Image: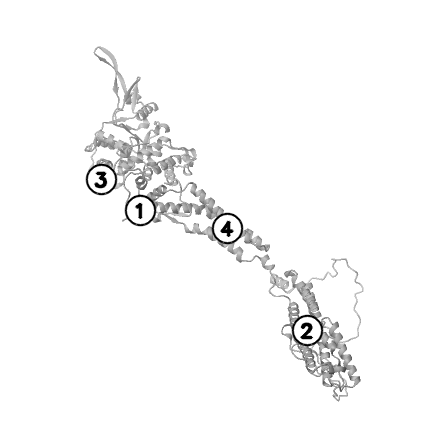
Amino acid sequence: MNREYATENEIEEAKAKLARLREVLNTVLFGQERLVEQVMTGMLARGHLLLEGLPGLGKTELVKGLAQALRLEAKRIQFTPDLLPGDITGNPILNEVDGRRQFVFQPGPLFGNLVLADEINRASPKTQSALLEAMQERRVTVMGETHLLPDPFFVLATQNPIELEGTYPLPEAQLDRFLFKLEVTRNPVQVLERIVKNREIGETPVIPAVLDREELLALSALSRRVFLPDVVANYIARLVHATHPEGSAAAKGLKFGASPRAALGLSAAARAAALLAGRMNASVEDVRAIAAPVLQHRVVLDYTARLDGKKPAEIVAAILEEVPAQERELPKTLKDAKL
Amino acid sequence: MANPRDFWAGAAWRLALRRNAASWCDLFLPALAGVSGLAAAVLLILRLLDRDARLLWLAWSGALALAAAAVAMWVARRPYTSREALARLDEVAHLHNRLVSAHAGIGPWPAPRPGVRDAARWHWPRLLSPVAVAGLLLAAVSFVQPPRARSSGRPSEEPAAWSQVSSWLQTLEEAKLADPEALRKLREQMEDLRRQKAEDWYSQDSLEAGDALRQEMEQGMRDMQTALQQSSEAVAEAARQAGRMPSSELKALSASLQQALQGLQAGNLPAGKDLLGALRNFDPANLSRMTPEQMAALQQRLSDGLKTCAQCVGPNIKYGTGPNHSRHGNNPGEGKGNGGPGGGGGTAPLDLDSQATNLHSKRTETSKDEDMSRALPGDVLAVTKGKHTVDKIAQPAAGGAISSAGEGGDAVWRDALTPEESQVLQRYFK
């Protein structure tokens, strides 16, 4: 495939812009540098993100901050069991124009650049399905009429992992639509202290806009032009293969492995991570860094592994340990050395 | 500072070379160990059978060469390339795949890094252990003789009788004293004994045969020695009384010489033909036919023969040369005896005289030895009158039947057990 790869100047310029965005977002969300990094990576890779964490950890603040920093239109949908598909996609409304009655499509909250789908697992499967279809196709069809969603279009969905009663867990096929599943972790004491000192309840932090829509789209396009060496592509392929029970010893506790969409996601995310790091090429290290968020929601544990209390993230970590960076291992008469 | 491109390309080439060599070693070394193990087993068998192993070494070398070539071809089918080596260098130097990208024309080459030569080190224990195992196996089999092979080797020393016979044969051959044909027969008999299996050299039959050969030869030499002595004395006597000897003595001298000549001809070990011829030509009644030089040569010849015999079997008892022609000599023997290692202390000074020594004793006494510990088997210690105590009740018993049941407390085992068995029982009952 002939493609024009990103130049050194383009990379340097992008690195500077992304560094500013990172800096701004870190002022919104204290102590979550890794989460910010992963969210930025996901956005550059044009992927949708599933955030899992307890309430009050700053998920909504992060989305709002992103919207302000990128000058994007942000929408928030609180998912409830009685939410209907039309409530999120929009409904045709009978309207009279010039003496003629016709249905006019009234866009729903899905029509935004940045959509925060709060507690997505509380909506009915029908509504979830409507959202996930829009995420995949980036368009909405109502009454036979197709409406394109704005570009860029990102969904950041959240799940509460503790209140499972009355929820509708997302099926594996739908989870596959999310590029990343990110764990929003509890803050340590020092970070909490910083939050207490710098924040007030009900007061929204003021975020300066560091990028606009066009710049974000350009950065996203640039990330796709980052060079992916053959050795990295080979590593991604072997890694995805290793998530299948017959693919590796570590995957014995899995019922199903990751899909080719996961491989594409790893590739896109590795390129985006390289761009964030200011490199002209993706590397095996980039793949390793984003492998857990890309793979952990795409593998299905088998019954025994569930009984053993294993978690997908642990198995993914074991697979990463097992799969070597190079396909051909060192001969037995040589030994590994780190410089 | 070297050009980064050249530096990394050189490092990748070296790594690829090392990696391919290691792949070759990975496959070849087990083959080396296996082939050597097999060769060691075959070599052990060959050594046990005492066969030539040169073909085995050829086969071993050929198999290794073949294996080396096959492994090289296998490795060459999919060699480790410099590009793969760059990826490896990327990994170990944490370069985030900058090297493979630079190789693809994306981005600059990273600055050279010292120590990159150690990207993959040789695992010496794994590399050398198969070689060591192969070497040790072959060395062990080559240098350590298996027990059976060791036992099949010739004994370090042949039986003493054989050595003595060989020594005598050599002495007689060098002295040209005995008939060569007789010596050849004796040597053949000796070689027959030697040709038997080495482990049978010290068998009872072999030892007895060797001893018989030695005794036969010794007897032959003693007979020859006696005949030579007799001839020598006759020749000396004839020379001493040349032309003045009475006819009766001349006749006796001729008879003695004839008897000696027969002895030299008819013994186990006949004398050589020239010596016999010279003695036959010697006529005591007509000594004028011989020149003094011929006489001296004959005497010298006989004297040398006597010395040769004495060298082999020791000196003969000298006969008296006095007027009575006593058969018993008055002089002690010369040299050591022939028995045992070292030859003993020489012949006993046996002084026998034709005249009995008068001790002027009127009383006959018996000698009595009170010290029974010095008694020898066969010595009569005492003669008494008595009766045989025959058990008239005893009946013939069947094989295995108990003839005497014994009673509790009888210490019957004391005389029936070996000292070792006795010690075991003592330890048990302690």
Q: Which mark is residue A194?
A: 3
Q: Earlier in the sequence, mark 4 or mark 1?
A: 1
Q: Judging from the image, what secondary structure is the residue with disc 4 in?
A: helix
Q: Earlier in the sequence, mark 1 or mark 2?
A: 1
Q: Position of residue A250 (x, y in %)?
A: 41, 38
The amino acid pointed to by label 2 is Leu
Image position of B36 (left or right of B231)? left
Q: Same chain for the residues at labels 2 and 4, yes or no?
A: yes
Residue that carries the numbered disc 2 in the rendered image: B177
Residue that carries the numbered disc 1 in the rendered image: B7
Residue that carries the numbered disc 4 in the rendered image: B61
In three-dimensional space, the C-alpha distance between marks 1 and 2, rounded to whole angstroms, equals 93 Å
Q: Judging from the image, what secondary structure is the residue with disc 1 in?
A: helix
Q: Chain of mark 3?
A: A
Q: Judging from the image, what secondary structure is the residue with disc 3 in?
A: helix
The amino acid pointed to by label 3 is Arg
The amino acid pointed to by label 1 is Phe
